[in-house]
Image: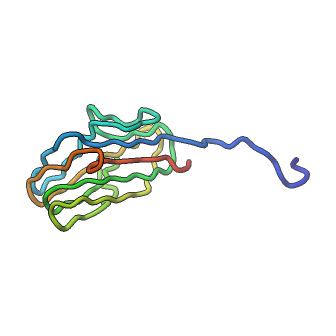
Amino acid sequence: TASTGMKWATPTAVSGPTYRVWKSGAQSVSAATWTKIQWNNEDWDTDNCFDTTTNYRFTPNKAGYYLISMAAGTASTFYGVIYKNGSQNSRLYYQSSAANDASGSALIYFNGTTDYIEYYIYSTATANIAAGTENTYATGIWLRG
């Protein structure tokens, strides 16, 4: 009871969207060009917030802080970057050698209505983004409001 200093309350917002997407099939990346990764498969998308057919972006329907990650690889030197609302937000990694995979993550706030992210790669040479659920994937999870 409140008289003892303890009061029970129903928690607000105990869960939110989470997803894991990946690429099947190679995607060409031109040299010295920012290229959006076209995520075309989902392992899950709990709140149907990831578009894997048109814009290849995550637009969460719940405001809060999200842990966003990505892993990818090409046969060249490359950057992996998150764009938020059309502008660079977080450079997740820089891979300075060819034929390697790299990964990274960032904590990003979303307003739950209009904010969205897209994943990009910048390669120093024309190459293909590695394909397959174990090679090129992205994840996101709502942490708190």
| Figure label count | 0
Q: Is residue 127 left or right of residue 89?
A: left
Q: Position of residue 84 (x, y in %)?
A: 34, 49
Q: How is the image coloured?
A: rainbow
x then y, percent, for residue 5: 86, 55
Residue nearest the observer in this picture, 52 or 111: 52
**Coordinates of residue 107 in the picture (x, y in percent):** 44, 56
| Horizontal side, residue 128 vs residue 143: left or right | left
Q: What's the residue at 25%, 64% (across, down)?
A: 94
Q: Is residue 78 above or below residue 66?
A: below
Report the residue that reaches farthest toward the right: 3
In the shown orientation, is residue 97 left or right of residue 82? left
Name the residue located 60 percent from the left edge and 41 percent from the top edge. 13
The residue positioned farthest toward the bottom in the image shown? 96
Percent across and percent down for residue 60 are: 44, 40
Q: In terms of image quadrants, where is residue 42? A: top left
Quadrant of the rendered image containing residue 123: bottom left
Q: Residue at x 12, y 60 (%)?
A: 124
